[in-house]
Image: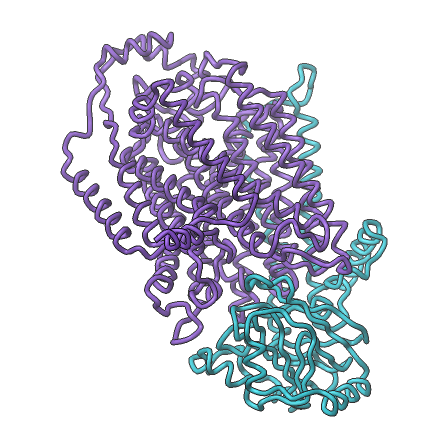
Chain colours: A purple, B cyan
Amino acid sequence: MFEHIRSFASHFFVTGEPMIYASDVAIVLFLVGIIFTLTYLKKWKWLWREWITTVDHKKIGIMYLISALLMMFRGGVDALLMRTQLALPNQTFLDAEHYNQIFTTHGTIMILFMAMPFLFALFNIAVPLQLGARDVAFPFLNSVSFWLFFFGALLFNLSFVIGGSPDAGWTSYPPLTELGFDKGPGENFYLLGIQISGIGSMATGINFLVTILKMRAPGMTLMRLPLFCWSVVASCIIIIFAFPALTVALALLLIDRVADAHFFTMLHGGNPMMFINLFWIWGHPEVYIVVLPAYGIYSEVVSTFSGKKIFGYKTMVISLMIISVVSYFVWAHHYFTMGASAGVNSFFAVASMLIGIPTGVKVFNWLFTMFRGRIQLKLPMLWTLAFIPCFAMGGATGIMLAVAPADYQYHNSYFLIAHFHQTLIGGVAFGLLAGMYYWWPKMFGFSLNERLGRWAFWFFNIGFYVCFMPQYFLGFMGMTRRVYTYSGDTGWTSFNFISSIGAYLMGIGFLFIVVQVLYSIKYGERDLTGDPWNGRTLEWAIASPAPHYNFAHIPEVTERDAWWDMKARGESLIKVNQRMAFKPIHMPKNSGLPFIMAVFFFISGFGFVFNWYWMAALGLLGVGICMIVRSNNRDSEYYIPAEDVEKTEAALGRV
Amino acid sequence: MKSLWQKGFILLILCLIFLTGCSEKYPVLHPVGPVGEKERNLIILSAVLMAIVIIPVIALLAFIVYRYRDKPNNRAPYKPNWDDSKILEFVWWGIPIIIIAVLSIYTVRDTFALTKPPANTGEPISIQVTSLDWKWVFFYPDEGVATVNYIDIPAGRPVQFELTSDAPMNSFWIPALGGQEYTMPGMAMRLWLQANKVGTYTGKGANFTGKEFSKMSFAVHVKKETDFDQWVKALKNQSPQLTEAGYKQLKKPGVVGKKSFSSYPKDIFHDTVMKNGGKYMNNDWMMKDHSQEMKGK
């Protein structure tokens, strides 16, 4: 019996690696610490009532943000481990197996569990406020989305200590990921973690598209919509059309793995190429899902910190929509070298280059928004300014990669690695950080310290170029991605060493952000006006942080840049409060169901990972019951009495 | 266009020499065959075209940020409501459209050109390539010999590589000769390459295939025709045979060194393709044999 348990445990838990044992200890201590603190401070009820059951978009946004920052830390540590291993030739710091796991988790986490939730954080925080709405269209669904993401990410990260991490790359190509070559549960963690959080992403896409189409304040026509909202529209359309492809790809591969089917196997009529097609039919639009909202953030920031209207608003909208459509016709450029005919390659090469046109136009429009403006170099603007040259270069190398015959020499080399890090960090991560700094006062009611933020900015930016510029040259030297070591006679040593130094500089930059947040919680400048940047859109018309119901009176919009226009007319929401009587406000009730349902999803996913079908079935049963309970619940809304609204507004000094 | 390429190329060479003091280390930029050269020329062309956009954009950014910074004494004009100019927008829709159009023409032309063997050269030879976990096996159908983890090829003759995999898909890449192509189970895809300069180059697997993927490089010895013939003769006389059992042994996951064989089971490559699902792929475009067209020339 004891033997039995021991052999089970040695497979169930990841063993034999001091670094992982140390992490085990750290994880246990961290959990005990949290449980102790919550119990000691008697905060369990508060946690449940205020956060876990909340359907308030602002709180959900904050939970997304915290999760995304934690995941950025984990993905960043993965990156540093890889760069440490590659700094010198023939290192044994990591062995092949661990290196393969680490690059897999790094890629998956950074795209799906860092960039996506970070964006959703900003969607949640900014979109309803910019629209002049009191919440999203489906607040309950919004909470479901968050908890599915959370438990999907948890399941994925659990593979670190239980069962072993996936190790076939974030693209997870079969037949390498089929049972014949990859028996371990790691790949199952990948499939189920992404699948569960993917359901949440899909729901978020629908939710925000409907919110923007249906919940705008009176007078806010589509052509008066803030550009961030437009970028969310473009992004949501892509989510809705692209995620189903991923869902299908992951589901079929899972069926291959748990039920021994043959969709993507080498033998018995399977075709691995089909997975690769489906994966990239989602995968390429996915990069536009994350980068288009970043464009929206840059548009808001550039206009605000130049004190000037955005240049060429209509062109900005048109180019967003063009990108969201053309993004579906470029996926095969991820495998020009997989035997497609010259005609196919030509089509996808030209389509990929076409994306460069609307993107280039946007860059010029940002530049000319600053032209004849007054540029304030606050943190959000700094990251935006850093974005332009970085993304211009990344875009240029992207067009070079789109030249199909030349791609035969770039494919899977470090040239490619440098390119997509330059677009995803320079384009997306810079935008996320700009957005975080920009909306931070609105979320928490205080600004982040500028000085510490500048240290973070310079470390991160200089580190970025030191890290990734050498990788273009490594590509020309023939260094391929995903190698865990190389020999000294390849001549790759010096560039790899420089690159690793850059990675550490970026790591220091991240630490400065952490210090900046901790310092500012105590000493950060409090925002009492609600409008710390002299903003242009409606979120700056209300108090920071926004009250539960956002707007005591829904504002009337008569112009683009609605709040700027109100200020110009000498109008404000405080004056509206004084003029008009308060009315009861209709709000959604909190609910614990989304959390419980996501827990059942997690249980089911965990069961599938280990082929414990009883557990998988039990989890799905739980999910079904939750859905039935929700469907029969008629008591999901309430009214905030007018007196309470008045009291809250008075406490905020806004009557 | 030629002069633009040359200028750009010289510029890039200067940069590289400045950066490293040695240019031999960049096989992609210093290819030794016509395929690699064509690809290199496209790389340079696209880099130059991109520089035409990027450099002015960065310069413009620096100028604007400096001139319109928010300082009390800044006397530059401030027009907070100026947000539209049809002429300007026309210009910056126009510039990228022209650049992308030019680049597209060259891209499409060379995409089609590279599916055919390099022109005006010697008699083509054929090599069948199978990627295994974690090694490369090469069969020479005309010479009847086989090698593991290295190939010898004659200089100046086009080589038609026929690629498949008897393991997860990999990608067959010899940067100094030209671009790569995937090795896929159940398919036999073709790739033309040629080396004009005698020497030893490195080839590698470019697509991740699991644990020891990093060990999947192989040597490419480019030899004079006569040396190549001698090498074949030596192999035939001195090396062991590759048997079915020997291939099965090779197929087991693991890392091995270089090996040479005097013969191999005749249909082994074809059988491998068929066994892994090749029967479904008979009409596939990439599997068409272009060597017949070549011989007709």
In the image: residue A618, left or right of residue A186: left
Measured as percent of width and height from the top left, residue A318 is found at 46, 44
Give the number of callouts. Answer: 0
Which corner quadrant holds the C terminus of chain B? bottom right
Q: Residue at x 80, y 53 (%)?
A: B16
Q: Which quadrant of the structure image shows residue B246?
A: bottom right
Residue lying furthest front in this view? Answer: A2
Residue A97 in sight here: yes
At horizontal 70% and vertical 41% (from top left) the residue drawn is A501
Of residues A125 and A232, the one drawn nearer to the viewer in this rendering: A125
Q: Nearer the viewer, residue A653 or B277?
A: B277
x%, y% of residue A123?
Answer: 41, 34
Residue at 67%, 18% (x, y): give it: B71
Quadrant into which the N terminus of chain B falls? bottom right
Q: Nearer the viewer, residue A31 or A236?
A: A31
Q: Residue, x 39% and y 75% (percent of image)?
A: A269
Residue A555 visible in the shown view: no
Q: Name the spot of residue A42 as percent of width and height, x first.
A: 34, 19
Q: Specify whether B68 is left or right of A328.
A: right
In the drawing, does residue B295 fall left or right of residue B4?
Answer: left
Residue B23 is situated, as x and y percent measured from the top left of the image, at 82, 58
Question: Closer to the camera, A598 or A26?
Answer: A26
Position of residue A248 relative to residue B187, above or below, is above
Can you say whether A277 is above or below B289 in the image?
A: above
